[in-house]
Image (cartoon, rainbow, N blue to C red):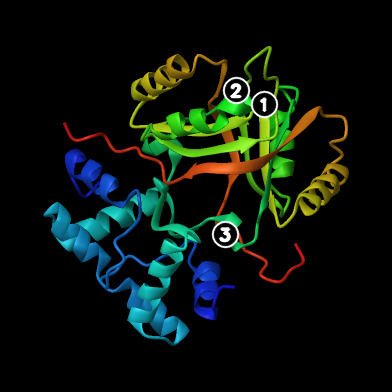
Amino acid sequence: MNVLTEVQQDRLKAAIQDGLPLTATPYRTLSLQLDLPEPLVMEQIEHWLREGYIKRMGLVVRHHAVGYRSNAMVVWNVADDKVDQVGELLRQADCVTLCYKRRRQLPDWPYNLYCMIHGKSRESVLTQLELLTRQYELQHIPRSILFSNQQFKQTGGHYARRAS
Amino acid sequence: MLDNLSRQLIDCYQKGFPVGPRPFQQLAAEFGVKEQEVIDCLRTLRSQRVITRVGPVFDHHRAGSSTLAALAVPSERLLEIADFINSFEGVNHNYEREHEFNLWFVVTACDHEDLQTTLQAIERGTGMPMLVLPMEQAYHIDLGFQLQWQDKA
């Protein structure tokens, strides 16, 4: 059961999607901003966490800033009936931080399985990729490695409905 | 180099940040420092852009609608087009990658309809071929991973 009404939830979501206020009593600060009782604000957030609507709550780190300067998105073209199986393998690799299936867009983009590898250098990322390719015997799957260069934007998602 | 408290906070609180009346006091007690030190440390990390925020990571799918998209942009227009993409509030990641499709971004919106509106506006505005690659299945999403502070990874 949600604690707040839908409108209140949208307002709370909008207020926290770019981060909690860094005050000694952040939930109280939010409750004053939104004119809602503090216990309800906390209960709603706890409810979202329990439900998995919020996946995690804490410091959102820019990996580049802490020395993880290399990041590759590896995209694979896996047979449709094998993609879940390969996805389950890749997710187990320690170096893989993200792994998911996306829709192909033919003819330009045949790839359907993605994994992200963060590392301190291009070489370390490639080494890790080669290790996991051998370990899980994925040599036969066509793939492409897209290293990231410039980062133009990185913020939280904006999902809250705009106030009308 | 990050100080000890910064590293502890990053190591321990990429997830599990407390929901309670004095969350920073809780962290401070755990690390044996003053509440205000924790707050100041997090403010500094944020202003140095080591962290983008202390807050929630919503489940993209359940919190609204989102997709990954990419454009093949001539290199001389990359900055201009990146700026244009960034001007959309729903765009939360945007970066260059080494590929013919060189500009990659994530668009988020409150619902599917709103998402399509933004994607169409981007496509119209750039006039470039666009890949729209919605997620179909997540196997693993965990950017809150353990960092190796020592130089071995």
Please, which chain is the residue tagged with disc 1 on?
A: A
Q: Which of disc 3 and disc 1 is earlier in sequence?
A: 3
Q: CA distance from mark 2 to mark 3?
A: 31 Å
- Coordinates of residue B95 in the picture (x, y in percent): 56, 38
Q: Residues within 10 Å of mark 1 (few under 14, many from 20)?
A: many
Residue where numbered disc 1 is placed: A112
Where A101 sits versus A124, above or below?
A: above
Q: CA distance from mark 1 to mark 2?
A: 6 Å
Please, which chain is the residue tagged with disc 2 on?
A: A
Q: Which of disc 2 and disc 1 is earlier in sequence?
A: 2
Please, which chain is the residue tagged with disc 3 on?
A: A
Residue where numbered disc 2 is placed: A103
Tag 1 near tag 2, CB within 8 Å: yes
- Coordinates of residue B49 in the picture (x, y in percent): 47, 59
SS type, badge 1: loop
Q: What residue is shown at x 73% (from left), y 34% (from top)? A: A85
Q: CA distance from mark 1 to mark 3?
A: 30 Å
B134 and B46: which is toward the camera: B46
A16 displayed left or right of A110: left
A75 and A153: which is toward the camera: A153
Q: What residue is shown at x 83% (from left), y 50% (from top)? A: A127
B48 and A115: which is toward the camera: B48
Q: Are marks 1 and 3 on the same chain?
A: yes
Where B109 sits versus A33, above or below?
A: above
Which picture quadrant has residue A106?
top right
SS type, badge 2: loop
- Coordinates of residue A94 in the picture (x, y in percent): 71, 55
Q: Nearer the viewer, mark 2 or mark 3?
A: 3
Which picture quadrant has residue A119?
bottom right
Say the numbered circle drawn on residue B136: none
- Coordinates of residue B151 in the picture (x, y in percent): 74, 68
Residue where numbered disc 3 is placed: A65
